[in-house]
């Protein structure tokens, strides 16, 4: 009997139901679209921001290091402290191996180029390294894509060098010149393959394959530091929970890619190393992603509020139109629970249908907005369907409470007097 009454009520008010369905669908669609974008674009934006260069540096344990890691001059390790070259490959054998995107070793010596002093850095430009999961192509070229090079980077294992633009202009060096590099009693002739445009401090340096610096230094297999780029979350505002009092909270904290957590795990996995996050850079990137997510949350809340208001106005108009019918039901003996079940049942059916439609429309909208902006297309995620149904249920309840109270307060005698 209740089902027949509910179905008849829905059929009799199709125009109102279409308006309610439209309100719920649009609100849920906007929310799901923003949720899908937040899940996908957050990671995409974090990866895009990683093009700004490294956000961690690994140094030998006990090495001296400037306080300002953002761009201060690098001090060499103290008393011969070095890292093994295989420390780069070990980065891909840690718990956070999937978060480590790029890395480049560096060994720095003070040398002369045609008699002029320069800080010469030996590094990998683009090298494939054997790791646990296969092969990993990385190097300075991938680590610092924001640097521009007039010419090209030196080839691996070649007698070539790239020079900072400021130093090259001051000395009149051009691409294709052959220059003599000297370090102590050792000398070598290198061909200039590129002029590097970077920040002012870096343009006073020169870069050559790591093997060239090893030859000048007279030893091999050791490096001074490793620059690396890793995906991390914004730093936690609270300290890690006490593992003895809250082991589950401590485990969640240590399994979250906070900069200090990632740094601690990396240095524990690589002996005699210390991993330092560039705090200002990491915090700045986290703030950008955090504000983007906050903006999406606010827009989703605005869409849900608008949806609730639309459903509220439609439900109120429906109760006013049906006041005689509701008064008659009360006069015939219908209880408050039965009246509430009838009104809520109508709204819930419409809202759940709107939730399903909003889920599909929202994912299509998110795919259209995102497109191939970050190099990959969007995939429809069924994981957001429960969220869409929960939002639809919340809109149905919030949009019906006011009209329901008004319906339950109707006096059958006053309504049926005419």
Image (spheres, rainbow, N blue to C red):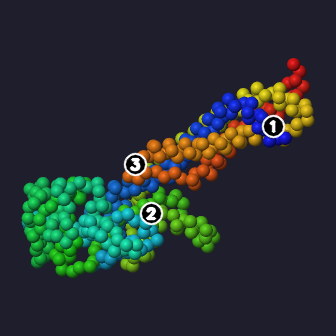
Q: Residue furthest bottom?
A: 219
Q: Is residue 376 above or below residue 76?
A: above
Distance from disc 2 to disc 1, alpha carbons, whole Å, reads: 60 Å
Residue at mark 1: 5
Measured as percent of width and height from the top left, residue 267 is found at 41, 73
Callout 2 touching callout 1 (CB < 8 Å): no
Who is closer to the viewer here, 98 or 83? Answer: 98
Which residue is disc 3 drawn over? 372
Q: Which residue is mark 2?
A: 259
Q: How far across and how far down the image is residue 17, in percent? A: 68, 33
Residue shown at 23% from the left, 79% from the top:
220
Q: Is residue 34 visible?
A: no
Q: Secondary structure at mark 1?
A: helix
Image quadrant in which the N terminus is located: top right
Could you tell me which residue is drawn at 16 percent across and 75 percent down?
216
Calculate the distance from the C-alpha at mark 1 to the C-alpha at mark 3. 50 Å
Tell whether 59 sits left or right of 238: left
The image quarter in which residue 356 lies: top right
Secondary structure type for disc 3:
loop
- Between the C-alphas of marks 3 and 2, the distance is 29 Å
Within-10-Å neighbours for mark 3: few <14, some 14–19, many 20+: few
Marks 3 & 2, CB-CB < 8 Å contact: no
Residues packed near mark 1 inside 10 Å, few (<14), some (14 to 19) or many (20 plus): few
Q: Position of 141 compared to 413: left or right?
A: left
């Amino acid at each position: 009997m209740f089902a027949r009454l509910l179905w008849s009520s829905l059929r009799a008010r199709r125009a109102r139901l279409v308006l309610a369905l439209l309100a719920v669908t649009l609100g849920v669609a906007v929310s799901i679209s923003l949720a899908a974008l937040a899940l996908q674009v957050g990671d995409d934006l974090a990866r895009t921001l990683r093009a700004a260069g490294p956000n961690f540096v690994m140094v030998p344990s006990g090495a001296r290091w400037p306080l300002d890691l953002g761009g201060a001059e690098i001090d060499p390790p103290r008393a011969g402290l070095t890292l093994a070259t295989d420390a780069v490959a070990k980065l891909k054998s840690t718990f956070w191996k999937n978060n480590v995107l790029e890395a480049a070793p560096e060994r720095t010596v003070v040398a002369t180029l045609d008699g002029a002093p320069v800080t010469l850095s030996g590094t990998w430009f683009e090298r494939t390294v054997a790791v646990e999961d296969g092969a990993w192509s990385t190097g300075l070229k991938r680590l610092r894509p924001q640097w521009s090079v007039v010419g090209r980077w030196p080839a691996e294992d070649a007698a070539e060098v790239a020079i900072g633009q400021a130093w090259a202009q001051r000395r009149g060096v051009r691409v294709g010149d052959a220059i003599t590099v000297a370090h102590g009693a050792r000398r070598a002739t290198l061909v200039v393959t590129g002029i590097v445009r970077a920040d002012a401090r870096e343009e006073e340096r020169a870069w050559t394959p790591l093997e060239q610096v090893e030859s000048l230094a007279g030893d091999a297999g050791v490096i001074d530091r490793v620059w690396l780029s890793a995906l991390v979350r914004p730093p936690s505002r609270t300290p890690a929970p006490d593992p003895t009092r809250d082991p589950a909270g401590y485990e969640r904290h240590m399994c979250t890619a906070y900069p200090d957590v990632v740094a601690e795990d990396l240095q524990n996995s690589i002996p005699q190393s210390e991993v330092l996050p560039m705090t200002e850079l990491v915090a700045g990137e986290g703030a950008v992603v955090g504000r983007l997510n906050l903006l999406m949350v606010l827009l989703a809340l605005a869409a849900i509020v608008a949806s609730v208001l639309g459903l509220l106005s439609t439900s109120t108009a429906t109760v006013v139109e049906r006041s005689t019918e509701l008064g008659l039901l009360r006069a015939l003996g219908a209880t408050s629970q039965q009246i509430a079940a009838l009104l809520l049942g109508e709204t819930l059916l419409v809202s759940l249908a709107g939730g399903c439609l909003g889920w599909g429309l929202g994912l299509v909208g998110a795919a259209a907005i995102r497109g191939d902006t970050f190099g990959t297309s969007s995939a429809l995620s069924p994981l957001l369907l429960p969220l869409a149904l929960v939002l639809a249920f919340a809109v149905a309840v919030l949009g019906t409470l006011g009209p329901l109270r008004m319906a339950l307060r109707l006096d059958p005698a006053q309504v049926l007097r005419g």
